[in-house]
Image: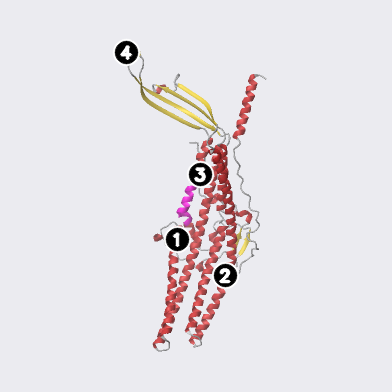
Amino acid sequence: MTLKDANARRGALCGALLAGLAGCAAGPDFHPPAAPAVEAYRKDALPAVTSQAPAPTGDAQRFVAGADVPAQWWTGFGNAELDRRITQALAHSPTVASAQAALRQAQENANAARGSLLPSVDANVGVQRANANSLGVGSTGPVAPSVFTLYNAGVKVDYTLDLFGAVRRGVEVQTAAIDYQRFQLEGTYLTLAANVATASFREASLRGQIGMTGEIIAAYNKELKLVEAQHEIGAKSLADVLVVRTQVAAAEATLVPLRQQLAQTQTQLAVYLGEFPSQTEFSALDLDALNLPRGVPVSLPSTLTRQRPDVRAAEATLHQATAHVGVAAANLFPQVTLGGSLGSSALHSGDLFASGTKAWSIGANLLQPIFHGGSLRAQKRAAEAGLDKAAADYQQTVLVAFQNVADSLRALELDADNLKAQAQAEQSASKSLELVRVQYHDGAASYLQELDATRQYQQARLGLIQARAARLADTAALYTALGGGWKGDSVTPLAANEPTTK
């Protein structure tokens, strides 16, 4: 074998070695966690349908196993005002704008990191005025100072051979950050829509409770006038009058906290919609104008982790932590940097890069960490601990997700039972009040008995309104617990930016 052939073989071997090194990266590779091996959300079997109640929003709900949650799930409540509110909130809420900006920031950080995979090229142009004195003394005395202008220009190229993947792992960190912010944005959409829906249901419930309490107060006032008239002719005592007046005052007092809660709910809605409370006008949202979705989707447990934005965000954090271990591991190995430059210096700008003015250089630099006081290995151990933390956080997020779904399913089942019981209680209280009133006017019952029957009827009506609102709110909670129907990039009005080379 000739010396030329041996050199060629060594060159090929070195090239193959460098190519092989460039294709690997230090540290563990990320693999998405497998779906939990769980077949159900609850230990007991989920009923096919819920109870049915003889009241508005008392329809039986059917659980549809394996069905997908609609992206705009709130439209299932069949209320145009609710649709308008959620649409406005998604378009104008500062929380959405913040999440969108965070996603754009993550995209640009990833673009900046990708730039490290390519050579960097820099140009420089300079001019300087200088003088040079001769330190020697000739036969005729010192040499006069020489003043001149020096022009220079050049191009410098640097490239880091990513032999052990430190740069690529850094890009992986920033790419995972994009995924995290994207799922954070999806979570913001989901949470905001759920908050607006829940607050709207609470507003409708409070309006119903205030209206019902007003009717009760009107009935009490009517009774008060009757008792006062009877007292004037001696048919009723002053004690009877005071009892009714106390009842009127007590009923009026219940309006104060209800009105306060309504005002607070409306100001909260204004913030959700991205408006100042003083500038927001709401159309009245009536509880009777809201429909209860009859078919409720229940996604398969095996798909929940791919639907919940918070779980996907935790997965992205796990991906980041895995890549950080790779960065820390790669920092323990040598770093090789290639560089070259081409420049020119001349006394006149027009002579730049002319013959005799050019200079060039090319070289390689190897940096091998030897002693850093143990900081590099400590950083690697810290990254590994961060990976363990991210894995535990991911597992906790998954457990909470399954808990949310199980709780929501149980709540819907019990809400239906509660509404059925409240509807029956309201019907019984209404019949009882009618009977007591007849007996009272016939003299067979005392006024205290009528007041007691009225209080029971009032509480039954309040309980019925609250039960109806709870059923609507818990239906929205189930949609939210299942991930709300958001499908990855479909909710993100941002296209992934192409990496730049600047």
Type of amino acid under label 2: Asn
Mark 1 sits on what residue? Answer: 268
Seen in the image, is 187 located left or right of residue 298?
A: left
Q: Which mark is residue 141?
A: 4
- In front: 248, or 416? 248
Colour scheme employed for the rendering of this structure: secondary structure
User: Which residue is found at the position 53% from the left and 38% from the top?
Assistant: 375
Which mark is first along the chain, 2 or 1? 1
- The crowding category of the residue bearing disc 2, from other C-alpha atoms within 10 Å (few below 14, some 14 to 19, many at least 20), is many
Q: Which residues are magenta?
A: 89-108
Q: Quadrant of residue 428?
A: bottom right
Residue 307 appears in view: no
User: Which residue is found at the position 56% from the left and 50% from the top?
Assistant: 314
Label 3 to label 2, Cα distance in Å?
A: 49 Å
Which dot, 1 or 4, sits closer to the camera?
Answer: 4
- Residue 40 image offset from top left, x and y in percent: 64, 59
Which mark is first along the chain, 4 or 3? 3
Label 3 to label 4, Cα distance in Å?
A: 69 Å
Seen in the image, is 114 located left or right of residue 50?
A: left
Number of dots carrying numbers: 4
Which dot, 2 or 4, sits closer to the camera?
Answer: 4
Mark 3 sits on what residue? Answer: 107
Secondary structure beneath disc 1?
Answer: helix
